[in-house]
């Protein structure tokens, strides 16, 4: 006879332990899948945030968010999605360039080189981006500030996730009321499949770097309080009064 117990003859304790093991394996699979999908959250029981197309009002500013479906609130959906990495377009020779699309890994260095290689350096950089790599946003922002460029948005443009860090780098920032600036939580490490203490260390170091960066750019780091409580699949849209309060809408003082 086989030494393996028939399922019906297993003790209650053994059946409970087996159930726990199956649950843990299933949960681990969901977390792994979520990591591959860049932040998929497990189902929640609270009310879902309204769609991003719903109008933003003070006190009602959190919206569902997907980078590939990110129109400005109240604006029609774009006919084509934004590029999956930043694209540089010269709008006015020697005056203005447009950076449009997601911020992909490597875009910080790449765009800094592309802008520096222009025959006539621009004075202003327009942004229209759903965000992306925090590290590259900080690198690109540092380059824009060192170069003395202004940043701006147009009517209906968006600047979400990591994009506001690039926007913050302008020596002056032009943000019309019909544009949309939003923040949320970020991943700072290469993967969420890390020991807990390593992941926490990565997050704390990254948040510290972002806050120091914002302070250097003349932005009140307190804006991060909205980012820290807004999950990656939602976005907190800053209303014009907050953009002014945190320093996004203001000319920098003469140094």
Image (spheres, grey):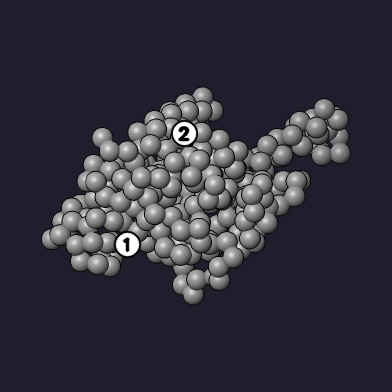
Q: Residue furthest front?
A: 254
Q: Position of residue 194 (x, y in %)?
A: 49, 33
Q: Residue at x 53, y 64 (%)?
A: 71
The CA distance from mark 2 to mark 1 is: 26 Å
Name the secondary structure under disc 1. strand
Q: Confirm or deny contact between disc 2 and disc 1 (CB under 8 A).
A: no
Q: Nearer the viewer, residue 29 or 201?
A: 201
Q: Circle 1 sits on which residue? A: 98
Q: Position of residue 195 (x, y in %)?
A: 51, 29
Q: Nearer the viewer, residue 197 or 209?
A: 209
The answer to whether residue 135 is above or below residue 149 is above
Report the label total.
Answer: 2
Q: Position of residue 233 (x, y in %)?
A: 58, 50
Q: Residue at x 51, y 28 (%)?
A: 200
Precedes in sequence: disc 2 or disc 1: 1
Q: Residue furthest left?
A: 119
Q: Position of residue 201 (x, y in %)?
A: 47, 26
Q: Residue at x 18, y 56 (%)?
A: 121
Image quadrant where one finds the N terminus = top right
Disc 1 crowd, CA 10 A, few/some/many (<14, 14-19, 20+): many
Q: Which mark is residue 221?
A: 2
Residue 76 in sight here: yes
Q: Residue at x 28, y 43 (%)?
A: 145
Q: Horizontal placement of 242 versus 168: left or right?
A: right
Name the secondary structure under disc 2. helix
């Amino acid at each position: 006879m086989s030494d393996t117990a028939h399922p019906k003859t297993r003790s209650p304790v053994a059946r409970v332990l087996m159930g726990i093991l199956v649950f843990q394996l299933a949960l681990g699979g969901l977390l792994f899948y979520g990591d591959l999908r860049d932040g998929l959250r497990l189902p929640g029981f609270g009310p879902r945030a309204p769609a991003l197309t719903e109008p933003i009002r003070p006190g009602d500013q959190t919206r569902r968010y997907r980078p590939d479906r990110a129109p400005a609130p109240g604006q029609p959906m774009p006919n084509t999605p934004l590029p999956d990495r930043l694209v540089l377009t010269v709008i006015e020779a020697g005056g203005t360039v447009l950076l449009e699309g997601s911020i992909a890994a490597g875009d910080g260095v790449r765009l800094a080189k592309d802008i520096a290689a222009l025959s006539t350096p621009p004075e202003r950089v327009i942004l229209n981006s759903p965000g992306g790599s925090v590290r590259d946003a900080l690198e690109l922002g540092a380059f824009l500030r060192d170069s003395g460029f202004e940043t701006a948005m147009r009517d209906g443009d968006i600047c979400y996730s990591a994009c506001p860090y690039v926007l913050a780098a302008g020596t002056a920032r032009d943000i019309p009321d019909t544009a949309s600036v939003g923040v949320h939580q970020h991943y700072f490490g290469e993967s969420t499949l890390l020991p807990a203490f390593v992941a926490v260390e990565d997050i704390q170091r990254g948040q510290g770097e972002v806050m120091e960066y914002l302070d250097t750019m003349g932005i009140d780091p307190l804006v991060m309080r909205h980012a820290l409580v807004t999950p990656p699949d939602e976005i907190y849209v800053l209303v014009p009064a907050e953009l002014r309060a945190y320093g996004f809408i203001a000319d920098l003082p003469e140094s």
